[in-house]
Image (tube, grey):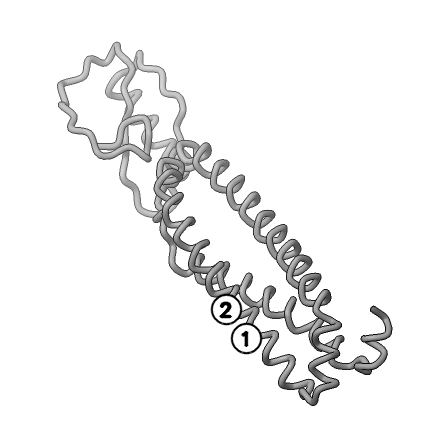
Amino acid sequence: MKLHDLTKPLLPQFYFPQNWWLTTSLVVRTEGDPAAVAASVRDEIRAAAPDAAVEDVAPMADLLSQARSQARFTLVLMIGFGIFAVVLASVGLFGVISYAVSLRRVELGIRMALGATPVGIRRRVLAEGARLVAVAVVVGLVGAAFSARFLEGFLYGVEPIDLPTYAVVAGLLTVVALLACWVPASRATRVDPARALKAE
């Protein structure tokens, strides 16, 4: 049985006849609402042991919820920090990549002056960004999978390597990075090449 901690593995237990003057826990399987059976259970216990004090009568669902409260709090806290980290990473990634692409405005102006089309320039910038993002996503996924084993002790009923979560986060950051490449490249291709060169 699981004893004291639901996150620990099953432990072997011995059962002995219990003396009624000691503390005893009684589990009753019911059909329907457990609260409706509580009064009759109390009556049966008092009939069998008139001196026994009956207290802490609660449905098993409530007891399990209390036992999982610490794990639930840790999980909610980790989810909050995870969402904050993804938002912060998205904003930072967008800012850094869009700034790096905007610094290439003169280069893009020269390419357009030499005959490059706006569509070709946008494709080139996106291809370069996609290569960078692919390397970053692979490194990030390997790092996440490696660090997941250190978080395994904090998880209950959840696998440390959750492929759908990894896919969603990697996809979100990939979309953000590609948008960060596309937006400044689109702006640069809408500007007249001569004006872009004079501005520098």
In percent of width and height, residue 141 lies at 42, 55
Q: Does 173 appear above or below 187?
A: above
| Image quadrant assignment for residue 4 | top left
Residue drawn at x 13%, y 23% as measured from the top left: 14
Foreground residue, 86 or 72?
Answer: 86
Q: Are marks 2 and 1 in contact (CB under 8 Å)?
A: yes
Residue at point 26%, 16% (across, down): 49
Q: Which mark is residue 131?
A: 2
Give the residue type that dot 1 points to.
Ala
Instruction: Look at the numbered disc 2 and give the secondary structure of its residue.
Output: helix
Instruction: Classify the position of the N terminus by image quarter.
Output: top left
Q: Residue 2: x and y, percent?
A: 26, 32
Measured Cα–Cα span from mark 2 to mark 1:
6 Å
The residue positioned 69% from the left and 89% from the top of the image is 115
Q: Nearer the viewer, residue 103 or 29?
A: 103
Residue where numbered disc 1 is placed: 127
Q: Is residue 22 left or right of residue 58?
A: left
